Image (cartoon, grey):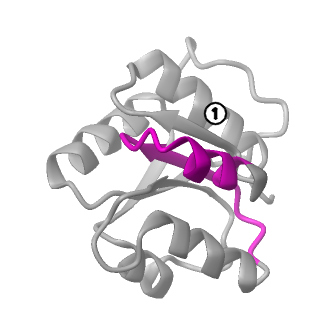
Amino acid sequence: MDDMPPHSGIVRDPLVYLVEDDAAVRNALALLVRSFGWRVDVFANGEQFLTQAPRPWQACVVLDLLMPGLDGEAVLHLLRASGSPLPVLVITGDRDGPRLERLRRSGVAGVLLKPFGAAAFQEAVGACLNLAPT
């Protein structure tokens, strides 16, 4: 935990909601989040996240963009339409420039392109946690 980057605004007991449809990626990222000393709740798809994530929300969301059913963009739209203040970090292998620009303009905390390394992931999630409601 000593090698964690400083986060002045971080919530007291950091929680990451991880929404990823690929089980292998979901499990690997969950282990990585735990290795940073943060709690993680995992969800296999957007519908599961929206219906099962505990409220009140005091976390950040790591949200895969390309998923069956409700994709990441639809989940983000529903979160914002509901007035949710949750910061969202989008992770994706999709390099569609206009779509990524649309996401950035929508107020996401960041977009991290797959594949990414552990250090880049830790930095991006840490920045997202700094924006989480306390």
As rendered, which of 3 and 65 lies closer to the eye?
A: 65
Q: How many marks?
A: 1
Vertical order, 19 against 97 (above or below) = below
**The C terminus sits in image quarter:** bottom right
Disc 1 marks a residue whose amino acid type is Gly
| Residue at figure coordinates x 65%, y 54% from the top left | 103
Vertical order, 66 against 13 (above or below) = below
Vertical order, 88 against 35 (above or below) = below
Extreme residue toward the left, this view: 24
In-image side of 87 versus 31 (left or right): right
Mark 1 Cα-neighbour bin, 10 Å: few <14, some 14–19, many ≥20 = many
Extreme residue toward the top, this view: 3
Q: Is residue 94 shown in magenta?
A: yes
Vertical order, 106 against 123 (above or below) = below
Residue 85 drawn at (x, y percent): 78, 67
Q: Is residue 51 shown in magenta?
A: no
Residue 43 drawn at (x, y percent): 34, 67
As rendered, which of 94 and 33 lies closer to the eye?
A: 94
| Residue at figure coordinates x 20%, y 54% from the top left | 22
Q: Which segment did they paint magenta?
A: 84-104
Residue for badge 1: 126
| Residue at figure coordinates x 44%, y 75% from the top left | 49
> Where, by quadrant of the figure, is residue 45 drawn?
bottom left
Secondary structure type for disc 1: helix
| Residue at figure coordinates x 52%, y 52% from the top left | 16
In-image side of 89 versus 23 (left or right): right
> Where, by quadrant of the figure, is residue 111 drawn?
top right
In-image side of 106 versus 39 (left or right): right
Residue 12 drawn at (x, y percent): 72, 47
